Amino acid sequence: MLILAGCAEATPDGQPDSKDLFEKSRHSDRAPSSFHDDVQRESCGEIDLSQGEQIPQEALACMDAAIGERNVELAVSSPTTEGDPIITFYRTSADASGVEMFSNGEYDKFGAGDWIQATCPATMALAAREGCQD
């Protein structure tokens, strides 16, 4: 008899679903130390994008409204060309302008598997369209 307990849901390709990946990423020991701070953040959502989809305008507006005003986070799962999930956390701070980005490549089977941290000195809408600086 086989008993499975506490198994996470998986997508058809065997990857855990994005909710599980958001949570695993938040607790990853491979994340930059600055990712693991004790700051309480409001949420602008957890978004699971399909191939070719963009971050919804409402989420971008939520982030832009918080820049320099509130501590907020937006979590986004987006697929690589091969379909592997990249988990990215965008954060704003009440005492800083711009958006901080932490991108987790641990689940990219064909990538380096590293985290990337960058600061986007502009609005979230601009960062989503043009990217950030390392």
Image: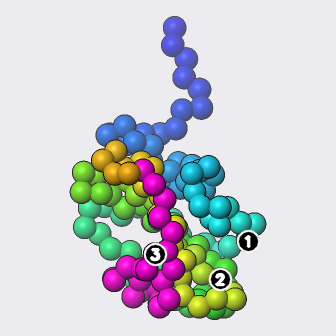
Q: Nearer the viewer, residue 127 or 65?
A: 127
Mark 2–mark 1 CB contact (< 8 Å): yes
Q: Position of residue 58 (x, y in %)?
A: 45, 82
Q: Nearer the viewer, residue 119 or 10?
A: 119
Which residue is identified by label 1?
39
In space, the residues marked 3 and 2 are separated at their CA atoms by 18 Å
59 left or right of 35 in image: left
Q: Is residue 131 magenta?
A: yes
Above or below, 91 against 61 in this view is above
Which residue is identified by label 3?
134
Secondary element type, mark 3? loop
**Of labels 3 and 2, the one closer to you:** 3
Say which amino acid is labelled 3: Asp
Q: Position of residue 59 (x, y in %)?
A: 47, 79
Q: Residue at x 47, y 91 (%)?
A: 122
37 left or right of 97 in image: right
Q: Position of residue 82 (x, y in %)?
A: 24, 51
**Total numbered circles:** 3
Q: Residue at x 40, y 58 (%)?
A: 86
- In the image, the segment drawn in magenta is 113-134
Say which amino acid is labelled 1: Val
Secondary element type, mark 1? loop
Q: Is residue 4 magenta?
A: no
Secondary element type, mark 2? strand
Give me the disc on residue 93.
Answer: 2
Q: Position of residue 75 (x, y in %)?
A: 51, 66
Above or below, 78 against 127 in this view is above
